[in-house]
Image (cartoon, rainbow, N blue to C red):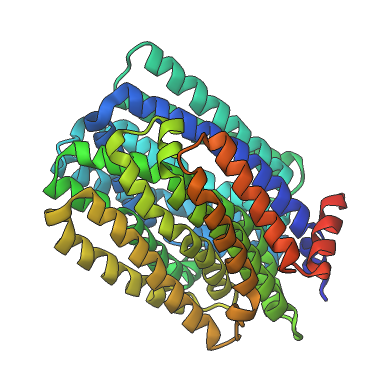
Amino acid sequence: MSEQAGRLGSRTVLNASLILAVRVVSRLVALVVVLKLASHLGAERYGQYATLIAYSALVSVVADFGLSSLYTREAARAPGRLPTYLGTLLLGKLPLAAAAAALLGAALLSARLGGLFLPGALLLALTTYATLIRNTFYAQGRLEFEAVAILAETVIQAGGIFLGARFGQGIAYFVWVYAASYGFTCVYSLLVIRLAGLAKGSTGVDGQLLRTWLKLAFPFALGSFLTNLYFRADVPILQHFRAYQEVGWYQLAYKPFEALQFVPLAVQAVVYPLLGVYHQEPGPRLAVAYGRFFKILILLGWPLSVGTLLLAHPIGRLFRLFPESEPSLRILSLAIVFLFANSCFTAMLYAIDRQDLFAWATGIAVVVNIGLNLILIPIYGYLAASATTVVTEAAFSVAGWYFVGRRLNLPFVRLSWRILLAGLIMGVVLVPLAGRSIFLSAPAGALVYGLGLVLLRAIEREELDLFLRGLRLRR
């Protein structure tokens, strides 16, 4: 095993645990903050805010062009060239960010939201630069610095939004707050990279490298665009056919679902560089890591699907969702387990240099998503958007499993049947508790699920030992 693989591998479990813990805190705070924002703005204005965010996500692909993902992989493989990589991309992304801002302006004008262009464009640019720069921490396995950035962003966003709600601010103010938080991350990350010696040597700019990487990154960009399309296209379609109120109902229901996305994404961000290194080495390490990665994501995602499905009403009361948002949340819960599994397939396709197959898998999901939304949203509104999200995630799971399977077989039945059974047992226990307080039903469900995993021996001793050893690791 190479020195780089050993270095990243020795930190993987600890890094995943650290980022997961920080993300739990930040996402819980962010969820509370968004609920406060929605309550302050009301369904219609919150729908307008959500539309801005959806358009920004769609055009952000132009601003990044897949370069951040490529940078993470290549910086993990060749850390000595990191200064040149980073310097080249910091300059090279300027025209991309300008082009993305122009597209955002056109989209906002079409939605009668032109007054939000300036803060929206700044948020777009700062977000894409923050993503690029902080990926250095993932490539180098130094997630303690990322943890600080996440917590700082959370504090800035929470403080700004609660102040804005208190003093009756409009939509633009809250967009400025988010932009400020990502601006801080850019400055902080650049300082840490320099002071901690993560980019040793002088930062250079390599025009030939940029041209080469733009070609290599195109599959990443296409995959990212298609991913954003099937995650976000429902909002513009819903906004076109229905009132902004329905956008607000749907997007508020989407927030608890969206808040869970950080779990697979946090694990994926840590495991992905290691998978990329294993791909370049002989032996079974990649196949073993693939199986364990899939298993842990199913283990985490399945009980969340079952629990949210059965406890949608108490969850809605806890988070003070709009009453119309609860049925949407119940439908969306069915997509959670697929969402988790998809992080595994995405990371694997990137790690084995098959970004083209990721683009195909995402394209299949996009066709399903846009087709169903265009047919069903004019008739059934925001509930159709919720159901289409479930079908889309399932379609990607099937396509991703098939494409990765052309290189590595995944014995998904053997890996997951005990986990699925434990979740179903938990569901049986939750049915009579669904009308009770979430503070009673949720812990009871978690306890039953945990006991089910133990009794069914869903977790092997070797996997548990690996996890416990990882928690004891020190940098």
Question: Is any atom of residue 185 visible in this view?
Answer: no
Could you tell me which residue is drawn at 83 percent across and 69 percent down? 462
Residue 92 image offset from top left, x and y in percent: 46, 54
Nearest to the observer: residue 307 or residue 171: 307
413, above or below 46, in the image: below
Residue 283 image offset from top left, x and y in percent: 76, 85
Could you tell me which residue is drawn at 16 percent across and 54 percent down? 380
Nearest to the observer: residue 50 or residue 300: 300
Task: Say whether residue 330 is left or right of residue 355.
Answer: left
Could you tell me which residue is drawn at 33 percent across and 31 percent down? 119
Name the residue at the bottom extreme.
406
Q: Quadrant of residue 302?
A: bottom right
Name the residue at the top extreme.
167
Task: Say whether residue 257 is left or right of residue 264.
Answer: left
217, above or below 152, in the image: below
Nearest to the observer: residue 461 or residue 343: 461
Residue 64 image offset from top left, x and y in percent: 43, 55
User: In what quadrant of the picture does the N terminus appear?
Assistant: bottom right
Could you tell me which residue is drawn at 33 percent across and 75 percent down? 364
Q: Quadrant of residue 189?
A: top right
Q: Quadrant of residue 112?
A: top left
Residue 217 image offset from top left, x and y in percent: 47, 68
